[in-house]
Image (spheres, rainbow, N blue to C red):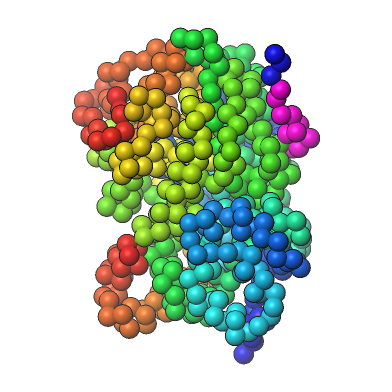
Amino acid sequence: MKIRINEIWAAHQKEIAEDHYYFARSCIRQNIFPAAENLYLNILKDELGKDIFDDERHTTCTGIAYHSGLIPMETIMTVVARQFALMNEAGYENFVVSCVTSFGIYVEMLETWKHFPETLHKTRTALKKATGKSFEIPKNLVHASDIIYKFRKELSDKTRYKLVNQNTGEPLKVVDHIGCHYAKIFPSHGVGGAEYPYVLAGLTDEWGGKQVDYPERRHCCGFGFRQYLLKSNRGYSVTNSKKKFESMYPYKPDVIIANCPGCTFFLDRWQYVIAEQQGKTYGENGFGIPVLTYEEIAGLLLGYDPWDIGLQIHQVTVEPLLDKLGIEYDPEKKYKGINGEDIGIPEKPNILKSV
Amino acid sequence: MPTLYEQLEKDVRYIEGSKACMNCGVCTAICPAAEVSDYDPRMIVSLVQQKDEAELEKLLKSDTIWRCGECLSCKTRCPRGNVPCYIIQALRALSIETGLFIESEQGRKQLAIKRTVGDHILKYGYCIYFDEVDLETYPEQGPVWDWFRNNRESMMERLGTSYKKNTSGTLRNTSKESLDDLKKIFDETGGTQRFEKIEQYSSVKAKELKKDFSGEKDEYWKYLYNE
């Protein structure tokens, strides 16, 4: 029987530059998954032969504070303008954003400048006055996952492994989770739009996996910005993640892939919290469902050592996924420090199974 | 003195987010906040388009405007092009500017966020920063994070980061020049004044509630953050 794949996404495409990118890093990704961005840069440079500039001068876009109701729009607009000025100074025109919150911010500012031209004028004046800098709008602005999507076939040619269970020969069941601010705010800026985003599903299809289409596929992970940032309000966050886990659970996913740093974090950590508080686990045999970013999945399939790309920093144990993929790894190296230094191992959770 | 509406209508997010709402409720149906709290974006849009100054003031003093998680799912769905979340952003800004945020339990929590994320921006150049993410403040980080933090020097090197280094790369130090640029942008565009207002209005409320207000993670911060 022919399997029907929803192809509505194909009507929503966007321009993704071919080469020569300026890289804007993510606050959450650098702090929570500190090997991910270097892996991304290595894939672009070493595997795809692309030029991508890692600038030590840029700062946070302040997006998390902005979406927590903390800072004025004029402030974030001018911080965004400074990042563009740095890109101009470095001689680049194509801006690549590592964070989905930031991606939404950059697109929102570009759209606001179009709809309210006076805000662009005010921003230019404020930036000049504050820093002496001027800026030009990028020729192309994309999220980091867009580039992996664009070159998914080229990467597929280089992979050592596929998203296939080596024990059964069956495609792995992959849940894709797209950060809300990737396409829900401005659908035309996301591959596949807001209803059928294809930026991660395209990787799943190309690399041999099977998409899991579950009822709450498009539901928010539950970050909620100020709702997570306050301990008193975190019920908002875990409740929304739980809604997703309960919805995907009957489909027995092998892995969750995400393109948003916050979502990756919440879908990983809230599985630990739900297990410890309620005794509920969502993976097989008491494990959780491993949650990886798009470049972590790409890195594994390309043959990078899982412990070199930081998968030991995830709270949900990734070994069940590695075993299904047929990836060889050294368990002894998992928790070693620099130069094989013995630095002990993490405590095991009471409920959530770990290795 | 301009009315609250006159101030609200200057905010481009209010202008962009407010079309003629027909009260269909699709935004509420899709809203993650409506599912877990007493929050209804349809009611917010319906209320603000009535142009009732007294009702607007009540809204600015309420917990309601602080319940939204800013996922912006509502923007995708509204058949009329309204954006309840943009309206919320404008209402939150006005609530702080007028000092009305301290009249609600949720509103006054902005101080706790200002003293974490807000201050991190100007201190580190990051919204969140590794050194500040401890298990007491973020217990859900779990035992792997705890192990990682306790072995940060070795592990940050192991994972190839630039933690605490003055170079490019992951978690590099933000240069003084870049931090100075941020501060000057905040001064020029109202960010600094916004932070000062949050501190000033909060000091009044802390006194009223008889909580210590000495800065950073003082008694008032702990009360707002935890309870």
In screen coordinates, is A206 left or right of B168?
right
In screen coordinates, is B90 left or right of A121?
left
A51 or A119, nearer to the observer: A119
| Quadrant of residue A11 within the rendered picture | top right
Q: Residue at 61% of width from left, 59% of height from top?
A: B28
Residue B19 appearing in the image? yes
| Quadrant of residue A30 within the rendered picture | top left
Main secondary-structure element of the magenta-colored stretch:
loop
- Against B35, is A348 above or below? above
Quarter of the image where the C terminus of chain A is located? top left
Q: Position of residue B221 (x, y in %)?
A: 32, 67
In screen coordinates, is B68 left or right of A206?
left
Is residue A234 rendered magenta in the image? no
Q: Position of residue A7 (x, y in %)?
A: 74, 29
- Against B102, is A221 above or below? above
Q: Residue at 27% of width from left, 52% of height from top?
A: B136
Span colored in magenta? A4-14
Residue A310 appearing in the image? no
A20 or B57, nearer to the observer: B57
Q: Residue at 51% of width from left, 34% of height from top?
A: A248
| Quadrant of residue A55 within the rendered picture | top right
Q: Residue at 69% of width from left, 19% of height from top?
A: A3
- Against A258, is A318 above or below? above
Is residue A12 rendered magenta in the image? yes
Residue furthest right in the image = A11
Quarter of the image where the N terminus of chain A is located? top right
Q: Position of residue A146 (x, y in %)?
A: 64, 34
Residue furthest bottom in the image = B1
